[in-house]
Image (cartoon, rainbow, N blue to C red):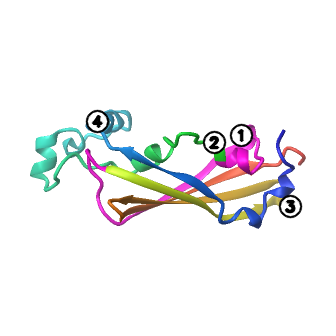
């Protein structure tokens, strides 16, 4: 049973999700490019990527979000905070890039809750999760995801 929504408050800020790593694979990059309608051969053809100055296929802009969801237990955060997954709606995502990631890279993902706030008299709560993505300890990107949690009592 979920904890009452009134329990989702600023005390959740700082909650960490267990870190994980993900290997970037060429085949997955090609599939993602096709699924998202990417027509630039830089994302699907190794020779085209190298002609464009890349060492391998570059990671398309939003693909890091997919890798972040590959945590061994992606919904652990919500369960730990007592949030019923049926009340969650994707709100927004934001990416800040520091370096290009490529096929063959192993990326590390470290996430924590960085904000919690309410609107509509508490009927809607917003949980902001920030993820630092690194390669060999060097920053690659910062991902920011906001989920909207509906309080079913309203």
| Secondary structure under the numbered disc 3 in the rendered image | helix
Dot 2 or dot 4: first in sequence order is: 4
Which corner quadrant of the image does residue 123 belong to?
bottom right
Residue shown at 34% from the left, 37% from the top: 37
Q: Nearer the viewer, residue 41 or 68?
A: 68
Q: Is the C-beta separation of discs 1 and 3 under 8 Å?
A: no
Q: Distance between the residues labelled 2 and 4?
A: 27 Å
Q: Distance between the residues labelled 4 and 3?
A: 45 Å
Q: Residues within 10 Å of mark 2 (few under 14, many from 20)?
A: few
Q: How many labels does the image show?
A: 4
Q: Is the C-beta separation of discs 2 and 3 under 8 Å?
A: no
Q: In which quarter of the image is the N terminus?
A: top right
Dot 4 or dot 3: first in sequence order is: 4
Q: Which label sits in the foreground, 2 or 4?
A: 2
| Label disc, if present, on residue 85 of the rendered structure | 1
Numbered range of the magenta stretch? 77-105
Q: Is the C-beta separation of discs 1 and 2 under 8 Å?
A: yes
Q: How crowded is mark 1: few (under 14 residues within 10 Å), some or many (20 or more)?
A: few
Q: Is residue 84 magenta?
A: yes
**Circle 4 residue:** 30
Residue shown at 22% from the left, 38% from the top: 44
| Label disc, if present, on residue 121 of the rendered structure | 3
């Amino acid at each position: 049973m979920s904890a009452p929504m009134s329990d989702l408050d600023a005390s959740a800020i700082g909650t960490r999700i267990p870190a994980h790593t993900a290997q970037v694979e060429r085949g997955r990059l090609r599939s993602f490019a096709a699924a998202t309608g990417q027509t630039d051969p830089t994302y699907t053809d190794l020779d085209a990527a190298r002609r464009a100055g890349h060492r391998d296929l570059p990671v398309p802009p939003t693909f890091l979000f997919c890798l972040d969801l590959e945590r061994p237990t992606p919904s652990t955060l919500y369960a730990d905070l007592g949030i019923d997954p049926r009340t969650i709606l994707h709100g927004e995502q934001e990416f800040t890039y520091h370096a290009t990631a490529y096929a063959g890279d192993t990326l590390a993902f470290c996430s924590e809750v960085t904000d919690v706030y309410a609107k509509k008299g508490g009927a809607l709560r917003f949980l902001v999760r920030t993820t630092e993505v690194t390669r060999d300890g060097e920053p690659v990107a910062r991902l920011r995801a906001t989920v909207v949690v509906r309080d079913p009592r309203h």
